[in-house]
Image (cartoon, rainbow, N blue to C red):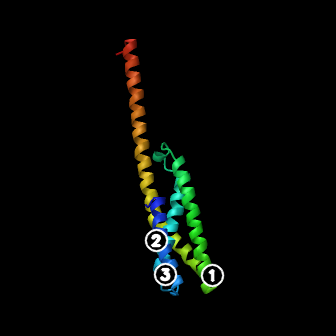
Amino acid sequence: MIDPITAVGLATSAFNILKQGISAGKDIQEMSGTLAKWGSAFSDFQYAEDKTKNPPFYKMMSDNSASAIEIFAQKKKMESMRKEIKDHISWTYGPSAWEEVLAIEGEMRRIRKAEAYKKQEMIDNAINFVVGAVIFIIAGLGVVTGFYYWGRYQGRW
C-alpha cells in the first residue's frame, strides 16, 4: 500500500509526462500507459485519504492532525492536476474523450479495489486481531493476577 505522499509524487511525475505529451501533440492512445499510472496513483491517494479518515485500530493512537493537514494540501494538488488533465483532454479530443477516460478510470479503480486494497484490508484486519488478542490476554492475566493476590491477601491460598 502506498502512502498519500508517495501517491502524489507518482501522480505528479505521470502528470508532467502527460502534460508534455499532450502539448507535443501525442495521441491519447500513445499516452494511455502514463494515464493509467496517473489514474492508479490518484486511486491510491483516494484510498489512503479514506483510510486516514477511518484508520485501523492499531493506528488510532497516533497523532493524525499533521497528517490530515498534509493530505488536505495534497488533495488540492491532485484536484488541480485532475482538472488540468480534464481540460487538456476535453479541449484536444472533445468532451466525449473525457467521459471515456472516466469510464476507464472507474474500471481501474474497481479492479484495484478488488486486488490491492482488499489485500491491505486483510492485513489491517489481521493486525487488528493480533493487537486485540494481545490486549485481551494482558487484561485477562491482569485480572487473574489481581484475584490471586487478593485471595492471598485474604488468606484463602
Check disc 3 and report its element: helix, strand or loop: helix
Give the image location of residue 143, x and y in percent: 42, 27
Count of numbered circles in the view: 3
Residue 112 location in percent, x, y? 48, 69
Question: Residue pushed farthest left?
Answer: 157
Query: Residue extending furthest right?
Result: 95
What residue does disc 1 label? 90
Q: Position of residue 42 (x, y in %)?
A: 52, 67
Q: Amino acid at mark 3?
A: Ser
**Label 1, residues with CA under 10 Å away: few <14, some 14-19, many ≥20:** some
Nearer the camera: disc 1 or disc 3: 1
**Residue position for label 2:** 13
**Residue 61 in view here:** yes
Dot 3: within a 10 Å radius of its alpha carbon, few (fewer than 14), some, or many (20 or more) residues?
few
- Residue 80 badge: none
Q: Secondary structure at mark 1?
A: helix
Per the model, the C-alpha gap separating discs 1 and 3 is 15 Å
Is any atom of residue 54 visible in this view? Answer: no
Residue 116, compared with residue 97, is above or below; it is above
Give the labeled residue for mark 3. 32
Residue at the image point whose x is 39% and y is 17% from the top: 151
76 with respect to 3 (left or right) = right
147 shown above or below 127? above
For this rendering, which residue is in front, 131 or 82?
82
Q: Earlier in the sequence, mark 3 or mark 2?
A: 2
Q: CA distance from mark 3 to mark 2?
A: 15 Å
Q: Quadrant of residue 150?
A: top left
The amino acid type found where label 1 is placed reads: Ser
Disc 2 residue type (three-letter): Ser
